[in-house]
Image (cartoon, rainbow, N blue to C red):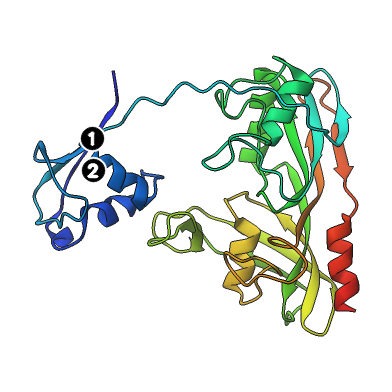
Amino acid sequence: MPETKQWLIPPDAAGARLDKWLASQETLDITRSMLQQQIENGNLTVNQKQVSKNYRLKGGEMVQWAVPEPEPLELIPENIPLDIVYEDDDLLVVNKPKGMVVHPAPGHSTGTLVHALLYHCGNRLSGINGVIRPGIVHRIDRFTSGLLMVAKNDTAHQALSAQIQVHSFTREYQAVAMGHFREPDGTISAPIGRHPVDRKKMCVTEKNAKPAVTHYHVLTEYQKATHLRLRLETGRTHQIRVHLAYLGHPVLGDDVYGKPYPGIEGQCLHAAKIGFVHPTTGQYMEFESPLPEYFQKVLRGLK
């Protein structure tokens, strides 16, 4: 049976477009274009009647969405080389290259880290996150390079996820940010939530947000940019990118929260260190990844 979501439209929503109002709801993680498609398909109705995609709310209506069943997805393993830093029966630590997507998403149905893991590990990956994200405990963005963990079984996955939840999991990044910082060390404590207009972006906001804390340390200052080491206390989506843009120092090359930079695609951000307690042995383990060539090239260009 397909899931049905419904909303009683409040009076203060009168005049708003149905798709725009729905896209702003905290419980939905869906773009306006996808909502418009659902309206046109008749899956989204107002007072049990089909409406146009530019329907404007009057207030007091009952909106219902018959959420379609997800289409079956069969991922085909792909023989893509992996830079494996560590591996045992419970987990892997992988050094992800810049430009590789972690798991399948619209526009990226092949060539992801998950496809490579399926080839390397076969069915020895945790299933907690479903068929589309087997083994994935935490993610890093497509154009962020560096270290991430992969769980081979559900017990390891649950133990590692619990460490992330209580902030006992070490995550250190290096980044190049635009401009100069007033202090050599600092903490950015600002809640992060979904952007009210662009649902693909995050922003610092008090509305429907979660606490987010990032600690930074200045490594080297250049004429127009700064090389930073950053430690995550929390792990919100795009956290470092959002926090640095919020300070007025977006990550160099970040074309979502800042500006593109010639010579590199996407942000100059590298997951340089991770540390965690092994779910079976109880031993604390820590791994580091040296700065990749694209990052070093940026630094050389800034000198």
Query: What label does residue 275 carry, if any?
Result: none
Q: Write down the quadrant of residue 251 in the picture.
A: bottom right
Secondary structure of residue under mark 2 = helix
Q: Write down the quadrant of residue 158 in the picture.
A: top right
* Residue 192: image location, x then y, percent: 51, 58
Q: Which residue is mark 2?
A: 39
| Amino acid at pointer 1 | Asn
Count of numbered circles in the view: 2
* Contact between labelled residues 2 and 1, with CB atoms less than 8 Å apart: yes
| Amino acid at pointer 2 | Ile
The residue nearer to you, when weighing 114 against 178, is 114
Residue at left 84%, top 34%? 284
The residue nearer to you, when weighing 159 against 126, is 126
Query: Could you tell whether 260 is left or right of 208 in the image?
Result: right
Query: Could you tell whether 214 is left or right of 217 in the image?
Result: left
Depicted 277 relative to depicted 198: above or below: above
Residue at left 66%, top 75%? 249
* Residue 119: image location, x then y, percent: 75, 22
Q: Which residue is mark 1?
A: 43
Residue at left 21%, top 58%? 17
